[in-house]
Image: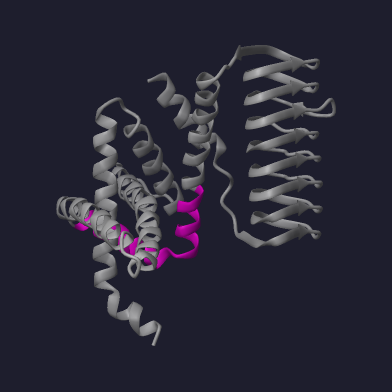
Amino acid sequence: MKRLIIIALMLILLLPPVQALQMLSGDQVSIDSPIDDDVFASGGTVTINAPVAGAVIAGGTIIINAPVSGDVFVAGGQIVLNSDVEGKIVAAGGDIDLRGDAKNAVIAGGNVNIHSTAVISRDAVIAGDTVSNAGTIIGNLTVRAEDFQNTGSAGSVDFKKSEGLQGLQQVMNIFSILATVGFLIIGIILLKLFPAQFFSVEEEVRKSPVKNTLVGFVLIIASVILIFLLAVTLIGFPVALIMGMLFIIALMLSGLFVSFAVGRKIIDVFKVKTSDILIFLLGFVILSLLVRIPYAGALIGIVAISLGFGAIIYALRKNWQSITTSFT
């Protein structure tokens, strides 16, 4: 139960402020002019040279040279944070160097270096192969690593040596939390950019939950069998590849629609008026906690995925004519 509470708090604390979004992608992405909104960027190399409100970045090499007034979520091969972050830093990658200030830091990587110029005003949680801290951590510093060097300072230090599978498990636990936060961000993006399509599927979730769960479960099994049969034939392999990608995407998104339906149900019970984002957040946190309950959580997860998958199929069927018409 303690772990469930921690995950819930992580989800709430790590949620970036929802504002208008700036989405950038390309092999080389460089932000050289200030942006007052949150930035979502992906590319081979992503460089931020001007102030931004917040950043969610995935890339090979990520370099932040300018102040960030909100939170930073980054995942990449090499991550260099040279400037201050007023909010939280959540980073996962191969080599991670932190030279600026931040409020909190959650970091998972191969080699993690907190340099002497860095100040974390609250807590830092770090997992990696090699971790070095020469900075200042005002609160608690929690480290799980094979090798840890601490020439800096911290309010308190909790270090446990990770070896072999134990070290891998520590990293995987943090990656699991980061992945959960990632799905939360995807849900928010879908709500903001494709509200009509999102609510079309969510309506199917609420309208016939039992039917959609049964149909979704059967269709998931049937889809796996069909994709496998196509994959073993030379002619059908390209079709199986495309179907497989669409199938995986549908499975990954299915829980997001169920999350909103759960949040809406709770809001309706208490008769509270709030924004769609907060409704989604409430349902997402509750569903994330439920699927982590031992034994029962696996069943809840299967039901949620089946329900969401079935709702997606019914929504596509219901709107198929308008979808095909738009391409003609």
- In the picture as drawn, the residue positioned furthest to the bottom comes out as 328
Magenta-colored span: 185-207
- Residue 269 appearing in the image: no
Task: Note whether 139 is above or below 177 in the view shown.
Answer: above
Q: Nearer the viewer, residue 133 or 44?
A: 44
Residue at 34% x, 45% y is 263
Residue 194 shown in magenta: yes
Q: Which image quadrant: the C terminus?
A: bottom left
Q: Is residue 28 left or right of residue 129?
A: right
Q: Nearer the viewer, residue 82 or 208?
A: 82
Q: Is residue 102 left or right of residue 6?
A: right
Task: Note whether 11 is above or below 254 in the view shown.
Answer: above
Q: Which image quadrant: the N terminus?
A: top left
Task: Note whether 1 is above or below 37 in the view shown.
Answer: above
Residue 18, position as x, y percentages in the image: 56, 51
Chief SS of the magenta region: helix
Q: Is residue 183 left or right of residue 28?
A: left
Residue at 51% x, 32% y is 10
Residue at 28% x, 45% y is 304
Which of the 4 image quarters holds residue 123?
Answer: top right
Residue 188, position as x, y percentages in the image: 48, 53
- Residue 127 appearing in the image: yes
Residue 50, position as x, y percentages in the image: 80, 53
